[in-house]
Image (tube, rainbow, N blue to C red):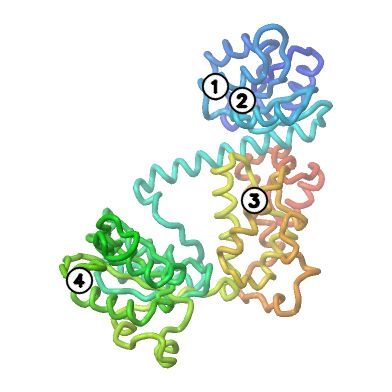
Amino acid sequence: MTEPGKANILVVDDDADTQALLCEVLTDGGYRVVTSSSGEEALKIGEQEVFDVIISDMKLGPDLNGLDVLKAYKSIQPGSEVILITAFGSMETAIEAVKAGAFDYISKPFKIDEVLLQVGRALENQSLIRENQSLRRQLGSQAQLPSLVGRSPGMLEVYKKIAMVSDSRCTVLIYGESGTGKELVARAVHHNGPRAGQRFFAVNCGALAESLLETELFGHTRGSFTGAFEDKHGILEAASGGTVFLDEVSEMSSALQVKLLRAIEDLEVRRVGSNQLIKIDLRFIAASNRVLAQVVEEGKFRSDLYYRLRVVEINIPPLRERREDIPLLVEHFLKRFVREREQTFSISTQALSALLSYAWPGNVRELENALEAAVALNRSGVITLEDLPPKLKPDSQNGDHLEQLHADLPSLDELEKRYLAHVLKVTRDNKARAAGILGINRKTLYRMAERFKLRI
């Protein structure tokens, strides 16, 4: 049996010296280690014992090679992570290993610190995946709901409004700059209300030409215009029973505004080219990145439609006004990348500082894209300042971007302390693994813990 808190590691290598070295280093690192000298023996051991991590040489003699071990363990122990080591690295082999499910691929001659780092990352990745699976089991169907992230006062107000309007059928008007998450709010209203089991349609009114938007919303009959070869159900008809989200509704033409107003008031639609009225049962949610009252004053939006849409307003604050949510958003996106890429990611304090200082004109979407770009080319698992897009680096940010941070924003020391505490929790206070994940030696780890008054 594995001792509580100790990770179980299998080392597969037909070279006795390499096997002994890995066994000694990993044992000193606080792990329980089992060794095997061949692929066949490794598979027999796997029938008797479950391992957290398997470290296998690629070339194992005449029987099975490292890829065979990898594929077998991904079948018999899918929760295990496999790290392959080879002296004959190539792009083709690396691609094959990754596609087969290898956590990482290390070339000889390897550094001991590199092996310890990858083992620590593999175990942390397992922990995050298990935590996510546990949360999904607890939440059940709610795990599929949209993810709104933030604890700032502005976001708490958004959550309150969602809770208050979800059970009603009133129309909702959502305001927010591009990239703030207007569709996520609309989906949250839908999924938390009585129509949750019905369809949700999102339409970007500013992305389609007037004639195309009309047929998309209301449908058309065969022969009603050139190219209309058959009858088509419009979105308002197809979504009946559910919710329709009209994004950038301010871009809708005057003629379509009239048709939309009638559909909302009468809950009836008429397809293009038809005189037949079709009953619908819909909840309407609209959104705009422009203040509709001002667009009404400009004569570009009907006042009667405006008042129909704004029964309840929800205002989403821009990211620059809720900077204290940035660390939470970063953690949220990095955890998602862990699930998608099966690789653990963290962020350095310098990189996080740059994210906190930037003005984010593209809001949460821009932050998500910046992190996705950073992880796409990152192999170390730690996002640094160099991984970020050039415009986010301090020397490229002008004075407009360096706004005063929110008074409640934690200091970099506090963020570093929280991250260190998180790593120690994930590694169960294993100093070697924690130091490996952080990319520091044990002496530095002890100094950090002493500085932050953390007991290790």
- Near mark 4 (Cα within 10 A), the count class, few <14, some 14-19 or many ≥20, is some
C-alpha span from label 4 to label 1: 60 Å
Mark whose residue sits in front, 2 or 4: 4
Residue under label 3: 421
Quadrant location of the N terminus in the rendered image = top right
Task: Identify the residue at horizontal 61%, vertical 45% (top origin).
Answer: 425
Label 1 or label 3, whichever comes before in sequence order: 1
Task: Identify the residue at horizontal 51%, vertical 20% (top origin).
Answer: 76
Residue 267 is tagged as 4
- The reply to whether discs 1 and 2 touch (Cβ–Cβ < 8 Å) is yes
Label 2 or label 4, whichever comes before in sequence order: 2
Q: Quadrant of residue 189?
A: bottom left
Residue under label 1: 50
- The reply to whether discs 1 and 3 touch (Cβ–Cβ < 8 Å) is no
- Near mark 1 (Cα within 10 A), the count class, few <14, some 14-19 or many ≥20, is some
Q: In the structure shown, which secondary structural element does the residue marked by tag 3 occupy?
A: helix
- Of the pair 83 and 201, the residue shown nearer to us: 201
Task: Identify the residue at horizontal 64%, vertical 20% (top origin).
Answer: 67
Amino acid residing under circle 3: Ala
- The reply to whether discs 2 and 4 touch (Cβ–Cβ < 8 Å) is no
